[in-house]
Image (tube, grey):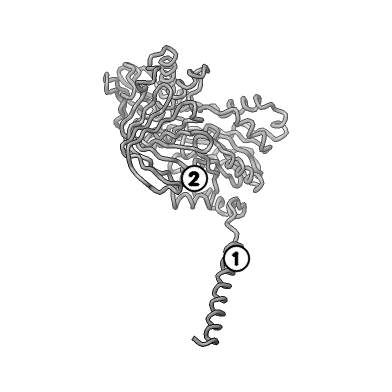
Amino acid sequence: MSETEEKAAVNASADKNDKAVNKDKNQKKKKPEKKYNLPRHKFWFGIGKPLTLAFLKFKANFKRTKNDLTKRPYMILCNHACDLDPLMVINSVPGVVHALASDHLFKHPVFGKFVAHIASPIPIVRAQMDLKSIKEAMLVRKDGASLLIFPEANCCFSSKTSYIAPATAKLVKQFKMPLALFNVRGSYLTKPRWSNSWRKGKTSCVLVRVIEPEELAAMSVDELYSAICEALSFNEMEYQREMHISFKGHDLLDGAERMLYQCPKCGKMMAMKSEGDSIFCTECGYKVTMNSEGFFEGDDVIFDAFDKWDDWQREQAVKLVTEGNYDATGETPVIVTPVNELYKAKRAEKNVLMGEGSFALYSDRFVFDTENAIETDEEGNATGVGPKQFVWKFEDITKLSCVHKNRIQIAVGEKEYYEIHSKNTYRSAYAYMIYFYCLKRHAQGKELDFFGM
């Protein structure tokens, strides 16, 4: 190669490198899409609200209730009974509303990105609201949009508003926004959390109270917490005992054993089985059928509805623990199910399968035994398969939650999460949660008045 050709080749190579560097700089300078973009969200909410309202009317016979809310940002709290609740609240409030939502919503590769673009919900790991979620919620306030929180952090199982953490009141005071308190009515019987089928009756979203920032500032945390609990307290079946609204559908009790896990006649655990509009005990044959108003019928009805049956189940859990009717040595499990999948859960990311096996609750721990544990490296790549026992001591568990119909989520410390999915889709994750909190609180010498929800 001549000297001239060599210089030309060097110059061409230098030009190519310069272009590559400039391209990298331009890519670095390109700003990512702003997550909380009020103009974008106003556009999508303007299109989405009429469409979702029409959907709610068709699917749940939703009737929008008039209220006096003005066009300004609110912090909104509401009870939670059904997956349609966020749409009901959003269609009852003017302007853009960002909701705190389970991180499972974001794990779908297509739908998750679509929802994130048009509505930008704030992801939380169902077990607890982390610092990152709070920071994102603060951005919503600065953006001038309303913030929707379901303080139960879960859809209720038994028709009654679940436990609301006292820290909710502290969070509300920290944001210094007008507080709007709502009740959703009819959504539990439209699609109970444990159910596989939809029904159609009547649903509504009622504004119960508005607390202005000045009044919030004057209230103590305890006073505010009491006001929140009072406004959000709602029992759908108690409401039905007065209203008698018909919710028409099919297979009305299909999946009910996810919540009604104990037979009220013989007391056998995990013996209930649903079939169509009925549920029966495989041990003693006790059977009831549910009518369109949500009440039980039959020759020997012990409880007329879900709320009273569940109250009794919780009483039985407390009785078992306080009377010591279980193996306190930890040798025999209180509850065990054979076929489950264990996943390592990450915030707003796809779960990583760790193995299949049995899942048991003992007096002081959870145990997952598997013959095919999948070992992974730091990047989540599988590195080997073999037998392993996973153990979570009660004292290491910061919170236990039910996810969807029957998944169990275990939070260990601040950033470690696991999920147990049952291949028996009718297994009761709810029973595990009830007995876990009874056993743990008993060991701590606390009152057995908290059941996780």
- Please report the residue visible at 61 percent of the width from the left and 54 percent of the height from the top: 39
Local SS, label 2: loop
Q: Nearer the viewer, mark 1 or mark 2?
A: 1
Residue situated in front as seen by the camera: 73 or 347: 347
Question: What's the residue type where badge 2 is placed?
Answer: Ala
Residue at numbered disc 1: 25
Residue 443 placement (x, y as % from top left): 48, 18
The mark that comes first in sequence, 1 or 2, is: 1
Residue 353 placement (x, y as % from top left): 38, 42
Local SS, label 1: helix
Judge from the rendering whether residue 178 lies leftward or rightward of residue 276; answer left or right: right
Do the residues under discs 1 and 2 have CB atoms within 8 angstroms? no
Residue 362 placement (x, y as % from top left): 39, 23
Residue most toward the top? Answer: 323
Q: Is residue 256 in view from this perspective?
A: no
Instruction: In the rendered view, tell whether residue 208 sits above or below residue 47.
Output: above
Residue situated in front as seen by the camera: 158 or 133: 133
CA–CA distance between discs 1 and 2? 30 Å
Question: What's the residue type where badge 1 is placed?
Answer: Lys
- Please report the residue visible at 27 percent of the width from the left and 18 percent of the height from the top: 284
Residue situated in front as seen by the camera: 304 or 62: 304
Residue at numbered disc 2: 348
Instruction: In the rendered view, tell whether residue 356 sits above or below residue 139.
Output: above
- Tell me the crowding category of disc 1: few under 14, some 14 to 19, or many 20 or more residues within 10 angstroms, Cα based: few
Q: Which quadrant of the structure image shows residue 61?
A: top left
Q: Which quadrant of the structure image shows residue 176?
A: top right
